[in-house]
Structures are given as C-alpha cells and as structure tokens.
Amino acid sequence: MNINYTIVTRFILLGFSGITNHQVFLFPIFLCTYIITVCGNLTVIITYKLSPSLHTPMYFFLAHFAFLEILYVSCTVPKMLSDLLSECKVISFSGCAIQMYCVLLFGGTECYMLAAMAYDRYNAICHPLLYTVIMSDITCIRHVVGSYVIGAANALIHTAFTFSLPFCGSNEIDHFFCDVPPVLELSCQDIWVNVLVVFVVAGCVIIGSFIVTIISYVEIISKILQLQSASGREKSFATCSSHLIVVTIFYGSAIFMYFTPRSSNRDGKNSVVSLMYTVIAPLLNPFIYSLRNRDVKSNIKNIFLWLIKL
C-alpha cells in the first residue's frame, strides 16, 4: 500500500512558545547571558595569552576550555535570540543538521575537556613531584586534540543517523535548537536503532568522561583529607566544590536529556533542561574555573593597569 507523505524540507523551532507572553522578557535576559559568557571566556583567553606566568598545563586547559565554551554557546543562543524576536521560527533542513553537528561536536569535546582538566588537577595534587613529567606540553596537546576528535566522531555518528531518517508530517521541533531527541520524535520511521545509538555512543562519551572526572575528584578529595593544614583543606574543598557544581549541572542535565524515556522529553521540558548545559554551564564556567582564581585575577588587574597607562 502506497502512502503519500509531505516530505519535510524545513523545521520550526517551538522554543519557549509555551510562555509566549513572557518571550519579550526572555530576550534581554538571554542576550545579557550570552554577552557575559562570551566576554568572560574571552577575558580568560586574553589573560592566558598575555601572562607568561600562567603558561602552565592548568591554564592551558582553561584557555582552550574557554575558547570551546564560546563556540558551544554560539551554536544555539544567537538563533534562539533571533527566534524570540521573530514570528517565523524556521530553520532549514541543512541548517538544522549543521546546528546539531556543531552542538554535538562542542558538547562532546567539552565532556572530555572536563575530564582532562580533572585528570590534570589529580596529577597536580596527588603526584606533585611527577606533575611536570606526566603533564608535558605534548601530553596536554594530545588531550585537547583527542577531545576534539572524540567530539567530532560523536557528532558525525549522531547527525548521520538522525538525518538519514525520513521526516514527514509535522515539522515542529519542541526545542530551541536542533537536538537529537526532539528531532527523532518527528521521524515517520521506527527509531529504535537511533535510540540504541544514542544510548551506546552518547553513553560512552557522556558517562565515560563523567566517570573519569568523578574518579579524579574522589582521589583529589581523598588526598585533601590527608592535608595537615585546616586552611589548606578548606581552600581546596572550596575549589573542588565549585568545580563539582559545574560538572553536576553539565553532566546531570545532559544525562537527563539523552538517557530518559522519550515520553519524559515532551511538553517543553527538554528546552528547560538543555538550557542548563548549553547556556547556564558556559556562563558559570569562566567564573568558577578561572575568574575566581587569585592568579588569574592578579594578572587581569595587571593587564588592565597596563592598558590604562597606554
């Protein structure tokens, strides 16, 4: 039996249409969030580049992480801001595929960058005498390149599997960007293979890097508990707790988005959850990881004073 379908050539991003009356207030909030996120991460990168004293493995990772955050947040927020001011929230089929690939690329890369940063802190605290040997320049570069390779492979697999499906009928994505779960909901074909791919591949990327990160912090906390100085323990715990907050927000929301039953990702919940790892985490990261750091703040002050004297 032949069934005629209307083939989808473009999608409509519903975004926050459930709170239409408040969208005018959402625009300035997300615009300020985006500006602060970009400026905060740019500050970290510029400070690292202009401060020779910060040219260590830890700040090397932080600078690359800040650059990654700018790319990551720029995949979704500019389009979301445009849609908040527009009645026509349309994205082309190819545009949706490109956006999905970029989000998954930078999101997957961020997972392993967080793991690399946790591993770096583990070696600095647990193996201080061997730290410079373990975390050599070439090792740091390999961690960064490896993170991007894993992110690119993860993005390619999910995007290829998702957009190889036929889409027909409804073209309304219940989300503010093209993410895998809400796009799969629009397919007119059985998606069990795609769901399996999400669980296996995303599981390796998200859960795998999360386990490495948690193990590193468990070892770090164990080492901190052995410190004789109470002030040293308090300072170290404060730093670790801040890092773990960001890690929990990023991984917790990502795990909820990709590993909960399909029925729970409806009614706009996916948009709210995705805000946590696509917008809130990139906003917090430069402040938690870098701008609260005494060395970074000191170098920012020196750069600012140098600019004033010019």
Image: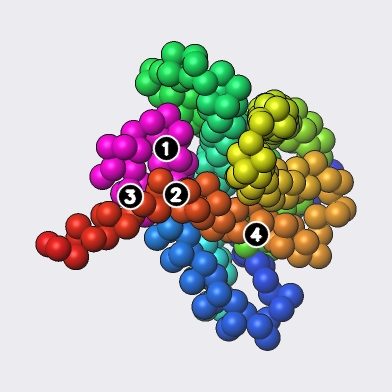
Q: Which residue sits furthest bottom? A: 21
Give the label, 3 or 1, closer to the camera: 3
CB under 8 Å between discs 1 and 4: no
| Above or below, comparing residue 38 to residue 107 in the picture | below
Q: Earlier in the sequence, mark 3 or mark 4?
A: 4
Residue shown at 80% from the left, 55% from the top: 265
Q: Which of marks 3 and 1 is nearer the N terminus?
A: 1
Residue 294's label in the rendered image is 2
Q: Residue 182, how many percent across, how many down?
A: 72, 53
Q: Mark 1 points at which residue?
A: 59
Q: Give, as a three-letter code, the residue at label 2.
A: Arg
Q: Mark 4 points at which residue?
A: 275
Q: Which residue sits furthest left? A: 310
Q: Name the residue under label 3.
A: 299
Image quarter of the N terminus: top right
Q: How far apart are marks 1 and 4 (CA)?
A: 27 Å
The residue stretch that appears in magenta: 41-68
Residue shown at 42% from the left, 37% from the top: 59
Name the chief secondary structure element in magenta.
helix
Q: In which quarter of the image is residue 194?
A: top right
Q: Which of marks 1 and 4 is nearer the N terminus?
A: 1
